[in-house]
Structures are given as structure tokens and as C-alpha cells.
Image (cartoon, helix red, strand yellow):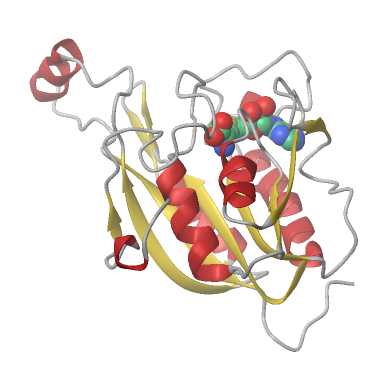
Amino acid sequence: MLGKTDLEATTCWDFPTQSEGDPDAGDPSFNGVTPARCVSNLVRRYTRPDELVVDPMAGSGTIGAVARSLGRRAVSFDLTPRYRSVFRADAREWPLRANAAALAVVDSPYSDNIVYGSDSRCLGRISCREPRFYEQMARVSAEARRVLRPGGVLAWIIADEYRGGAYTPVGFRLLSVLSHDFEVRDTVVLVRHHDRSASPLWEHRARRFNFFLRGFKFLFILRKPVGESGG
Ligand SMILES: C[S@@+](CC[C@H](N)C(=O)[O-])C[C@H]1O[C@@H](n2cnc3c(N)ncnc32)[C@H](O)[C@@H]1O
């Protein structure tokens, strides 16, 4: 696990592999898996031992696994649970009481480009070009605000989309939604590796047709205002 000096000091986080620092957390082959070391940085900075970490879109369970390995309690759920440590629930209705958690880490779909399951409630079925995408993310944000304790931190990972010749600034649009519920503390750039588009063919296309491949995701760090309970 990380030593104190291994915590990231800048707003550019670049982890060459998903499992670096915590080989047993998550499934590197899961589409959209969260880098383990990104999670350990968040858990170490924003929680103390025994505090609760929530992952409402848990996928292969990286966030809960890292949190538990650091001596925190963790709740991991997903609309389509596929792993033992993850139970079924909708990220728009957290089965948790108000003011219970110190940290929530959300690594959400960022458009309808990845099929996560057959459940029609999957947020990965909504295009980021539709206002509905941001309306549904606002419901997730409202639940995070309810369940986090005052001063608790919401960390949200999201990417922009470039598809069919159109760029959608998903990150900035989402940040505008989240800032209704939370104080914005910082924005981190999470360097992307091993995406399917990271190939000589796609690099050739990007140069030839004058567009850019997505090189990073946003990691937004927000805080529930102190002096406000979740209700
Ligand atoms: C980017 S993946 C999360 C990756 C995960 N952090 C990991 O490391 O494996 C997004 C997840 O959101 C889930 N999801 C989509 N809509 C949901 C909803 N309404 N409620 C809960 N989970 C949802 C998908 O099933 C998918 O597993």
C-alpha cells in the first residue's frame, strides 16, 4: 500500500496500470474500471480508519476493495452486480441513512458508448448529448449530498465524448450540475491508458481527420457544505 510520500501532489494523476499499488482491487478487464491508486489517494486524503466509503456504481468493485484494504468500511452497489462484494441497488436511491458516509466515489458512465447490462434503468443507456443524462446524474448527486456527512467528500470521475464528428464537454456540464449540491474543491486530470482507441489506427485517423483522442478523464473533488445535514 502507499506510503505517505506516495500520495499524489499535483492535479495530474498518471497510473500506468489499473492495479498499480493494489493488485487485488477490481478487475482490470472490466470496461471502464477505476485505477486502484486513484482510489487509495482519495481514501487516504479524505477519510479516517473505520469511516464509511460509498461506491454507488461499483462495477468490478475497485473502490470498495481499496477502501477495505485501508481499514475503512465500504458499501458497494450497482444496478448490474457481477461480483460478490457488490449488491444490487440504483445509484439514484442509495439504501443508506443520511449523513452516514465520509467519502463517495462515483465512476459513472459518461454516455451510451458502453453496454453495462440489460436493465433499462442503466445510466449507460443515455447519450451525454441529451439533457436527460444530466438530469439523472443530478439525482445521483442529490443522494450523495443526503448520505455524506457535512464536510464529506464526493469524488466523481467522468470523460468527455467525441463521437461522429461532435464533441460534447460532458465534464464541464456535469460539474455545473454537481456544483448546485456541493462546493467544488478541485479538478484532477486522470490520464487514460489502454483504451481501445489507443492504437496506431486510431492515432492515424485522429491526425488525418483532425480530431483528438481522449487522453484523460476528469476527477472532480467536491465537498458537502459544513453546517448542512442531509435531510
Ligand atoms: C465505469 S463503470 C464503474 C467501474 C468501477 N468503478 C470499477 O472499478 O470496476 C460504471 C458502472 O455504473 C453502473 N450503473 C449504470 N447505471 C446505474 C444505476 N442507475 N445505478 C447503479 N449503477 C449503475 C454500471 O452497471 C457500471 O458497472
**Quadrant of the rendered image containing residue 4:** bottom left
Q: Residue at x 71, y 64 (%)?
A: 50
Residue 116 lies left or right of residue 193; in this view the side is right
Residue at 13% from the left image edge and 14% from the top image edge: 200
In depth, the one of 22 and 157 nearer the eye is 22
Percent x, y of residue 111: 53, 31
Q: Position of residue 185 (x, y in %)?
A: 48, 74
Q: Does the image show residue 5?
A: yes
In front of the other: 115 or 60: 60
State the residue at coordinates (48%, 44%). 158
Using the image, determine if residue 112 lies above or below residue 105: above
Q: Position of residue 209 (x, y in %)?
A: 14, 21
Q: Quadrant of the C terminus?
A: bottom right
Q: Quadrant of residue 167?
A: top left
Q: Is residue 123 visible from the viewing direction of this image? A: no
Q: Position of residue 17 (x, y in %)?
A: 32, 33
